[in-house]
Image (cartoon, rainbow, N blue to C red):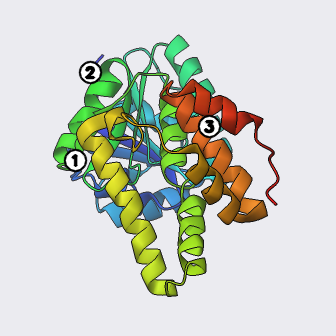
Amino acid sequence: MGYRFRYGVLGAGGVSKSLVGRLPINMRNLGPVASISFRVASRIANTRRAGYAARSADELNAAAVVLVHSRPGQACLLLDILETADIEWGGKAVIFCDCDDAPEVRARLKLRGASTAVARHFGIPGRILVAGNGPALTAAQRIAHELKLKPVGILPDAPDTFDAAVTLATAAITPLIDRVAGLLRDAGIRDGEAARIASALFAQTAGDYAHSGKQSWAWYTRPPRAERIGNQIAAAGAHLGPELRRLLLFGLETFAKYPDLERELSAAPEKQA
């Protein structure tokens, strides 16, 4: 079917700071802007200086692509509005921009004939995550191009897997960097310098991995001396020592190296003297 507008927006909470707010949309290609209330819809449209505030989400039927953005606290209400709207979903594209992609909602929309996609920042400047199918994926890739961003494409149903990787590389690793800085301080290095050295060590490791992959692992070609490893685990203390042991075992298991050392570390007591 033909559409009067390229884009419609369903949004609430921080739309101007999302991909929706950055997209160079003008009066000719942005149409209805819907939200949890007409007042909020008007505010979004006025901030964008394009489109018009919709009295009902039904008006999104006039747009080929619906761009969705919401803060977590408003997502349930907004998605309920989307699903109950009187919209002909066949051929419609829905893109979840910088927000929870709501896999169960995406699945239901696909059953009703819509194509869906996710487009969101993930912490690396100049890149955005893009996942989806059909016209929605094409539209998401076009958005990346219009914003001069490099799309990082993943499988349609893999955003949670991608997010797990990002969490592991960010929130999960920061406490480890902090513990490394703590050990450096215990070794006599001043606070600021300890933090800088810890950060540099992790950056160097990541850079080496980008260049050589698993072969950059410090022990890939030659195992460490078990005695030195034992001394280091003991020096790390009763609290951090067991964690260091588990991380070393994780590395040995990951790269399937040095089974004798793995058995020795596994058999060693968890508590340090």
The residue that mark 1 highlights is: 149
Q: Quickly name the residue at label 2.
A: 2
Q: In the picture provided, is 64 more to the left or to the right than 98?
A: left
State the image quarter where residue 176 is shown.
bottom right
Residue 55, percent from left and from top: 52, 48
Q: Residue at x 39, y 29 (%)?
A: 131
Of 147 and 201, nearer the camera is 201
> Does residue 25 appear left or right of residue 184 in this picture?
left
- The image shows residue 103 at horizontal and vertical percentages of 58, 28
Residue in view at x 58 percent, y 25 percent: 259
Is 83 above or below relative to 151?
above
Answer with mark 1 or mark 2, whichever residue precedes in sequence.
2
Tell me, yes or no, if residue 77 can be seen here: no
Residue appearing at x 39%, y 41% in the figure? 217
Precedes in sequence: disc 3 or disc 1 = 1
Foreground mark, 3 or 1, reads 3
Q: Which residue is mark 3?
A: 249
Near-viewer residue (242 or 109): 242
Where is the N terminus found, in terms of image quarters?
Answer: top left
Disc 3/disc 1 C-alpha distance (Å): 39 Å
Looking at the picture, tell me which residue is in the foreground, 64 or 241: 241
Q: Amino acid at mark 2?
A: Gly
Percent across and percent down for residue 153 are 32, 30
Residue type at tag 1: Leu
* 60, above or below 69, in the image: above
